Amino acid sequence: MKSLKGLVVSLIVTAGGAGFSAKAPGTVGTLVGVLIVFLTRDWSGFSFGIFSLALFFSGWWASLEWSRNTGLSDSQRIVIDEVLGYFVATAFLPREPIVLATQFLLFRFFDVLKPPPVRQIDHWGKRFPIGPIQSLGVILDDIAAGVLALGVALLLQYFQLPPFHLSQ
């Protein structure tokens, strides 16, 4: 039974194995998020919201288990946070390929650059020993990057600037 639990934890935290990528695991994890958002583009907002919440809580649990098992507080193998951050970056937006690609670039920009408050949230989570709060910090900095990416997109949409003038 422990091996089944380990497999489930591994599949969740690595977003189906994307976290094992030798190069740019965060980018590969975000691409998994792009694929999921694209494949669920016909879902209602409510259904996608419930799915996102379930993934958030399972990702939080799995990242805690992963951290406890590896002794690493923010392993590069954990990429479920990128998937969740990308979900936030695309919330309330049309799920057209050009919009999804734009949000991929914006999310990766904010995730890598870590402007305030993303960097502060990242540092906050790392102050705690391995446990529930530390694991929450692993996820929250990417959600904050997603919020920033969404904010830029909503401004582009409001002013009907590319790529959002195409989707009106």
Image (tube, helix red, strand yellow):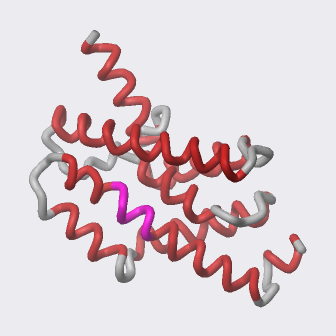
Q: In the image, is residue 141 part of the stretch drawn in magenta?
A: yes
- What is the x, y in percent for residue 149? 56, 73
Q: Quadrant of residue 5?
A: top left
Q: Residue furthest top?
A: 1
Q: Residue at x 76, y 58 (%)?
A: 95
**As drawn, is 94 to the left or to the right of 65?**
right
For the question of whether residue 30 can be seen, the reply is yes
Q: Residue at x 34, y 45 (%)?
A: 60
Q: Residue at x 21, y 54 (%)?
A: 133
Q: Main secondary structure of the magenta part?
A: helix
- What is the x, y in percent for residue 18? 47, 40
Give the magenta part as a residue range. 139-144
Q: In the image, is residue 10 part of the stretch drawn in magenta?
A: no
> Where 122 falls versus 22 (above or below)?
below
Q: Quadrant of residue 43?
A: top right
Which quadrant does the N terminus fall into?
A: top left
> Where 59 falls versus 123 (above or below)?
above
- What is the x, y in percent for residue 49? 60, 50
Q: Residue at x 64, y 62 (%)?
A: 90
Q: Residue furthest bottom?
A: 159
> Where 71 falls versus 101 (above or below)?
above
**As drawn, is 51 to the left or to the right of 164?**
left
- What is the x, y in percent for residue 128? 12, 58
